[in-house]
Amino acid sequence: MKTLVLTGESITLENLYEIANNPEIKAELAPSARALMQKSRDYIEGRIKNGEVMYGVNTGFGAFSSVRISDSEIEQLQRNLIRSHSMGIGEPFTKNQSRAMMVLRANALARGHSGIRPTVVDKVLEFLNNDIIPVIPCQGSVGASGDLAPLSHLALGVIGEGEVWQNGQVVPVQKVLAEKKIQPLELKAKEGLSMINGCQVMTALGLLTAWEARRLLWMADLAGVMSLEGLRGSRKPFDPLISATRPHPGEAKTARNLMKLMGEKSEISESHAVGDPRVQDAYSLRCMPAVHGAAKDALRYVVKVLETEANSSTDNPLVFADDNKVLSCGNFHGMPVAHAMDFAGIAISSQASICECRISKMISPVMSELPAFLTPNGGLNSGHMIVQVAAASLVSENKILAHPASVDSIPTSAEKEDHVSMGTIAARKFEKILRNAENVVAMEMLSACQALDLLAPLKPTAAVQAAFDHIRKQVPFAKEDRYFAKDVEAIKGMMVKNELIKVAEQAVGPLEW
C-alpha cells in the first residue's frame, strides 16, 4: 500500500493530485515532524503555565484579540471558534478536493510552528485514511486570515460535528464515527485556531486544477497540430532556429512539441508544398509557439507558487521554540496564491481563445478551402456552424471570469482585517475557466477531425493520425447534421482520461510542458 509521509515539505503537484483522487493511498506524519510539533507544543504549554497572554491561545480572535480568556475556558474557546466560523455557503467542494485540503492542512501543521499537539495531525489523517471526508461549502472565504469558513467546516467534522461524505451522500459525522468506531478530536489550547488559519482551500483547489491545466496544454498542442494539418498549414514557423532567438522556455518547448507531433512532412503537407499561393498562415497557426508557450510559462510559475505555499507555515501566531518567540504575523494572507490563481485563469482563457480562432478558420471556406462549415451538403446541413458559436460563447464567458479577483478587497472583522485577498474566489474561477477551455479544445478536435476527413485520402502525420483514429472509434465522420454536443462530450471524456495524449505520445514520444 502506498503512503505519503508528511514532513511539512512533502507536497508536489503530482503527489497531491494522486492522493486526492485515490483513497487507497494513505498519509502519515513523519517522525521528524512529530518531534518538531511536540517541541513546539511543550514550549507553548510552558508559557501558558507561566500565565502569559498569547493571541489565539488565551485571548479572543480578530477584533476580540484584547479579550483575555480564563484557563478554564480555553477549550471551550477553541470549540466556539470552529462552530461560529463554520459559515460556508453554497455547493460543496467535491470529495476529492476536500481530501486535498485535509492533506495540505496536515502538512502545514506538520512543520511545527503552530504549537499544537501531534495528535491533531494524527486525527486529521485518521479521518482521511478512513475516508471520513468533511463536507466543505465552496463560498464564504475572503482569503485573508486563511480560508476561515471552509477550513472551519473541515475542522468541524474532525471534532465530531457537522457533515461528511458517505457513498456520495451528505450525512452527519456522528453516524459515520459510530459505524467506524472512531473518536473525534478534542481541541486543546490554540488548536482550533491552528486548524483554520491558512490558505489550504485555495491552494488545494489551485493545485488540483493546475494538474488538469497541464494536461489541457498538451491537448491544445495536439489540437493545434490537428487543425494545422486540416488547414494545410506550414511547418516553417516552428523551426528551432526561431525560438532560439526569443528564449522564453515555453515557446521553445511548444515548438518542439509541435514539430514532434507533426513530423517533417505528411501526405497533406506534401500536397501543397508546391504552388501554394499563401505566404503566411493566420496567427492562430503561426503563433502557436508564442501563445501556447506563454500559457506553459504561466502555469509553471503558478505551480511553483502553489507548491511553495503547500509547504509553508501559515498559522498565526507562529511558534519558534528554539528562538523563544511566539510571533503574531500575516502568513495566513492569501495574496501570493490569489495573484497566481488570477494569472492562471488569464493564461488558460487566452489558450482557449486561440483554439476557438482555429475552429473559426476551419469552418470558413475562404480560410480553409474546405466546404463551408465542414459539411458536404451545406444548406440542408448546418455542419459545424454552432460548434464555433458555442466555442465563442465559452471563450467570451472566460473573458468575464478572468477578471482578477485579487484586485478587490473589502474590510472584515470590524476593520481589524482590513485587506483581504479573495484568493479562494480566484481559485474557483480558475477551475471554471479550465472546464470551459476543456470543452473548447474538444470542439477544436471535433472540427479538426471533420476537416481531416474532408481531405481524405490524404493522410496526416503519425501522431495526428493516431489521435484521429482514436476519436473516430466513438465519433464518426458527420455526413449530415447530428447531435454534436454528444460528440464534444465523448472527446472531452477521452481528454480527461488522458487517452489522446497517450496515443499521440506512443506514436512520437513524450511532450514537454
Image (cartoon, rainbow, N blue to C red):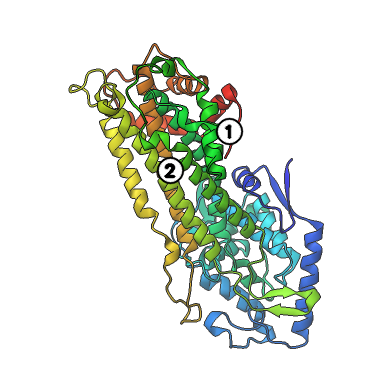
In the figure, 24 relative to 164: above or below? Answer: above
Q: Nearer the viewer, residue 236 or 182?
A: 236
Asked which secondary structure carries label 2, the reply is helix
The residue identified by callout 1 is: 511
- Dividing the picture into quarters, in which one does residue 256 lie? top right
On residue 351, the disc is 2
x, y percent for residue 358: 36, 34
Q: Residue at x 32, y 47 (%)?
A: 396
Asked which secondary structure carries label 1, the reply is loop
| Mark 1–mark 2 CB contact (< 8 Å) | no
In the figure, 92 relative to 315: above or below? Answer: above
Q: Nearer the viewer, residue 344 or 28?
A: 344
Q: Residue at x 44, y 14 (%)?
A: 267
x, y percent for residue 360: 31, 34
Asked whether, in this view, residue 147 is left or right of residue 223, the answer is: right
* Few, some or many residues within 10 Å of mark 2 (<14, 14–19, 20+): many
Tell me the amino acid under the disc marked 1.
Leu
* Few, some or many residues within 10 Å of mark 1 (<14, 14–19, 20+): some
x, y percent for residue 469: 47, 19
x, y percent for residue 416: 50, 81
On residue 349, the disc is none
User: Which of pointers 1 and 2 lies earlier in the amino acid sequence?
Assistant: 2
Q: Quadrant of the N terminus?
A: top right
- Dividing the picture into quarters, in which one does residue 23 lie? top right
Asked whether, in this view, residue 2 is left or right of residue 295, the answer is: right
Give the distance between the C-alpha atoms of the residues marked 1 and 2, in whole angstroms: 17 Å
Asked whether, in this view, residue 381 is left or right of residue 405, the answer is: left
Q: Nearer the viewer, residue 298 or 17?
A: 298
Q: Residue at x 50, y 42 (%)?
A: 293
